[in-house]
């Protein structure tokens, strides 16, 4: 059995719709997936409307989300699994985040315009389409399409990353607040791709703050990192997860679902 517990759709910054994700997962022979869009569970509403949530006996869908949280000098992502996506407290908090993302995008565009990058807010919304988490990736795409930069990475590096000319901070919960929220909606809080944080002391601090598990298996973890976080997870009796962090972006590994998978035994950790 093959599992992928970290997948993004057009509801945030992925390139495939929720329905397209399900179809590709089935074609890839996956048995369990979790859609973990940034700060939104809108993909699950789309799947419910399309009749896909209980469509296939061969594919189990684990409700998930990926929260962006804030710490000085660091952005930490926390995955939530087995959450109650209809919980009113969760929905209210996500609406606050969604509204702030829209305001932030307008402020970033105003800064870009002053810098000579003449893009329009309505164009960014068109690019975002049905996305509930409108943000910098959509702005970067417009900058590339309008010829200001050759790649999205270049746009981020020069004008959109932290401390760059057009950067605007946005509202984020603290890691502790996210952990408590995920607990309140019945889920497990998992530290996403700890190797990308760049500070293992912070990883230990987050474990002490009550994180339930670690995403040990991730495409940007080499074998040494995977082994290290497996040791840490076992030492602190944490749940172990993994996934492809799939966005469907050409030239970004993996380009298709099913290329990077983890063992189905990891699903058992989420129900413990």
Image: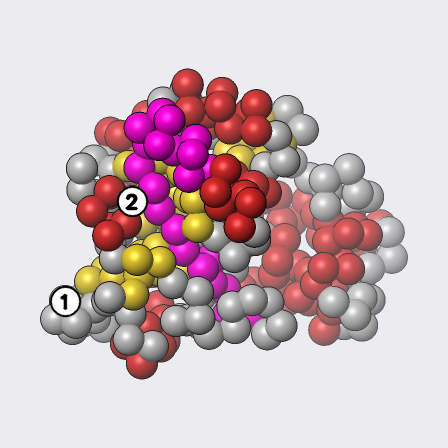
Quarter occupied by the N terminus = bottom left
**Colour pattern of the rendering:** secondary structure
In x, y percent, where is residue 223?
Answer: 53, 50
Q: Quadrant of residue 164?
A: top right
| Sequence-first tag of 2 and 1 | 1
Spatial CA distance of label 2 from label 1 is: 18 Å
Residue 54, numbered label: 1
Q: Residue at x 52, y 57 (%)?
A: 219
Q: Quadrant of residue 163?
A: top right
Q: Is residue 73 left or right of residue 254?
A: right
Residue 198 lies, with reference to residue 121, above or below; the image says above
Residue 135, numbered label: none
* Numbered marks: total: 2
Residue 192 lies, with reference to residue 135, above or below; the image says above
Element assignment for label 2 = strand
In depth, the one of 99 and 230 nearer the eye is 230
Q: Residue at x 63, y 53 (%)?
A: 136
In x, y percent, where is residue 93?
Answer: 37, 36
Q: Is residue 30 left or right of residue 221?
A: left
Residue 78 in sight in this render = no
Element assignment for label 1 = loop
In x, y percent, where is residue 39?
Answer: 43, 46
Q: Is residue 167 left or right of residue 255?
A: right
Residue 135 lies, with reference to residue 60, above or below; the image says above
Give the magenta-colored segment's residue range.
229-249
């Amino acid at each position: 059995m093959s599992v992928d517990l970290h997948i993004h759709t057009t509801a945030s910054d992925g390139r495939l719709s929720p329905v397209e994700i399900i179809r590709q997962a089935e074609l890839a022979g996956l048995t369990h997936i979790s859609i973990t869009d940034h700060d939104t569970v809108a993909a699950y509403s789309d799947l419910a409307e399309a009749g896909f949530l209980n469509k296939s006996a061969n594919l189990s869908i684990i409700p998930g989300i990926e929260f962006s949280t804030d710490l000085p000098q660091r952005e930490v992502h926390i995955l939530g699994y087995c959450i109650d996506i209809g919980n009113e407290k969760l929905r209210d908090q996500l609406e606050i985040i969604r509204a702030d993302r829209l305001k932030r995008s307008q402020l970033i565009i105003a800064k870009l315009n002053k810098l000579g990058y003449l893009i329009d807010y309505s164009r960014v919304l068109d690019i975002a389409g049905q996305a509930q988490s409108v943000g910098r990736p959509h702005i970067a795409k417009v900058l590339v399409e309008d010829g200001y930069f050759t790649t999205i990475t270049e746009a981020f590096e020069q004008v959109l990353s932290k401390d760059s000319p057009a950067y605007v901070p946005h509202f984020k919960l603290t890691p502790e607040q996210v952990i408590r929220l995920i607990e309140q909606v019945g889920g497990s809080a998992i530290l996403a791709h700890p190797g990308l944080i760049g500070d293992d002391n912070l990883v230990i601090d987050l474990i002490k703050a009550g994180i339930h598990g670690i995403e040990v298996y991730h495409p940007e973890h080499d074998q040494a990192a995977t082994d290290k976080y497996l040791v840490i997870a076992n030492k602190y009796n944490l749940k172990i997860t993994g996934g492809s962090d799939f966005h469907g972006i050409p030239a970004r590994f993996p380009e298709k679902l099913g290329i990077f998978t983890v063992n189905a035994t990891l699903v058992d950790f989420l129900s413990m």
